[in-house]
Amino acid sequence: MTITVQNNPPADFHPDRVREIAEALRGLDGPLLPILHAVNERFGYVDERALPVIADVLNLTRAEVQGVVSFYHDFRRAPAGRHVVKICRAEACQAMGAERLIAELETLFAVKLGETSKDGRVTLEAVYCLGNCALSPAALIDGKLFGRLDAPCVQAQVGK
Amino acid sequence: MTQLIYVPDDAAALSVGADAVAEAICTEISRRGLDAKLVRTGSRGLLWLEPLVEFATPGGRIGYGNVDAATVSALFDDPAHTRSLGLVEEIPYLKSQQRLTFARCGIIDPLSLDEYQTHGGLAGLRRALEMTCTDIAEQVVESGLRGRGGAGFPTGIKWRTVAAAPADQKYIVCNADEGDSGTFADRMLMEGDPFLLIEGMVIAGLAVGADKGFVYIRSEYPHAIAKMRRAIQAAHKGQLLGRNILGGGKYFDLELRVGAGAYICGEETSLLESLEGRRGQVRPKPPLPAIAGLFGKPTVINNVLSLAAVPTILAQGAAFYRDFGMGRSRGTMPVQLAGNVRRGGLIERAFGLSLREIIETYGGGTASGRPVRAVQVGGPLGAYWPPALFDTPFDYETFAEKSGMIGHGGVVVFDDSVDMARQARFALEFCAIESCGKCTPCRIGSTRGVETMDRIIQGERPVENTALVRDLCEILRDGSLCALGGLTPMPVLSAMDHFPEDFSRAE
């Protein structure tokens, strides 16, 4: 199955591309989230400079757009590392040692949860449930779901 | 005759290598020049056996559990291979279930509308098309169906309210923002039998006079999003959606929307805000969404499992569905068993089975082999219970009497290595992370709660600080605008009540 792979090299930011995306989706009912998702996917993050453009197309204030962007965990404010590891730290995964695994990964990649490693290789993020709770611990690595996860498995994916 | 071989493409199966197994099977078929075909299905919900491969035989499908790519060739050589589980339908875990909603999941190709119909799909919608709007809603009322998202509000009453509300436009919104840890039934259904959800939504539209629907799926479910998107396209082609539903001249359109990583958007008013393109902040009620919901219009907002139960009710009649269950909990509940458990998976049974049966008979105890110390039922806002309460039957009212809730049906098992003070701290931390910020008890109280729990864990005046957390929980419970703040005290207080030793160790 084809799913979004998040480690594609993000396109260079250009306000005109943002305007194109916003214009194409403005006809939807409640278009702001679909537009932000599209921008996030296209550039790998939502650049500060995209906000006034989206606000202009939707006839919103910049503050309204800013408020929505900052509310949702998915919209990045800066590009991610080459690999994105979204590791679940909700209860079912905790019961199978997720906190220990997170600590291992933090050491392994020299990165804190919620940050990108200095070499830009890995972004390690917490996620609260991936719906894979019978096969915990679980993570989404570059958009691909893993279950019964351990540190060597993450390293094998990120090492590629 | 062509040999059919089944491998799930459900996200859980994929997470443990189902794609590699499927690929190996295709290689083997062509290498051996066999007249065989691989079919990708949803999951049976026997998740500890994934990847589960099934071979069709005249006597039924034979299953092989925990298959990896390297084992595939041996399965072709020896049908009695050690991984053989015999007939899948005869596996006690599955055989003992009462599958109404998940009857087709794991059996059919989820995107084949033909197979959906061959296996009983669309019978409910066909009946609904012959009925009046009022009769459809009354069937749902009579069935006793209650909202499966967690609140347990009678689905039919909601529909009645929306049907009676005068408006030029009404909406059906499916809440597929399944954020509770330990739950995956919505995901499994959308990936394994998406037409059932679509059929349920079309019926809801007919019942209340709505011609537009939205499915709001959380972004953490990329496979479910992809599957639903393709199912909606196929439904348009097959006249299950669009201008002339099943040739009956009715209109219903469906749009898929993706969440953006906010647990609070599973709360119905917050979800509506999010759909409208705003911060997912909770709306005060009243007005109810049934009166003024999406874009201010009367809106039915139901959980995936509530809507997916509707086709069965229409096809088999309200009495058939109501005959399952106990007390005021009617029908079946897809229980999701997860965490530190040997046999995790989906168990659809009539209400009334005991927690012990779920954890011990189905689950077989912990995965670690250590004793079970606690289970959390009903997601991150549900209570932590000790084994002393395991004889409680799965029922909305009985759980509420014991200060617990069944929520969306998730059961998360913990072994004796769990530190309940840390779990209580996490409940408050989760509330702080996911609070929408609209009301003060939730926004501020959660953070103060985490700080106070830290003191307890460090052994700083545990008695006084525990009393302080209890007091704070009271404010959260009584003063919060929605269930996030209102129910966060449930895991915290239940941990303190049932496992007091974990809150006073350093004293």
Image (tube, coloured by chain):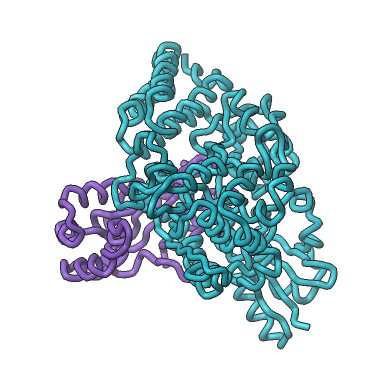
Chain colours: A purple, B cyan
Query: What residue is at 69 percent from the left and 66 percent from the top?
Result: B53
Query: What residue is at 48 percent from the left and 52 percent from the top?
Result: B174
Of the pair B212 and A56, the residue shown nearer to us:
B212
| Residue B144 image offset from top left, x and y in percent | 64, 40
B381 lies left or right of B319: left
Asked whether residue A142 appears in the rendered view, the answer is: yes
User: From what the image shows, is residue B395 above or below residue B293?
Assistant: above
B103 lies left or right of B161: right
User: From what the image shows, is residue B10 above or below residue B165?
Assistant: below
B127 lies left or right of B217: right
A31 lies left or right of B455: left
User: From what the image shows, is residue A128 above or below residue B380?
Assistant: below
Query: What residue is at 55 percent from the left and 32 percent from the top?
Result: B418
The quadrant of the image that shows the C terminus of chain A is bottom left
| Residue B333 image offset from top left, x and y in percent | 65, 44
| Residue B156 image offset from top left, x and y in percent | 57, 43
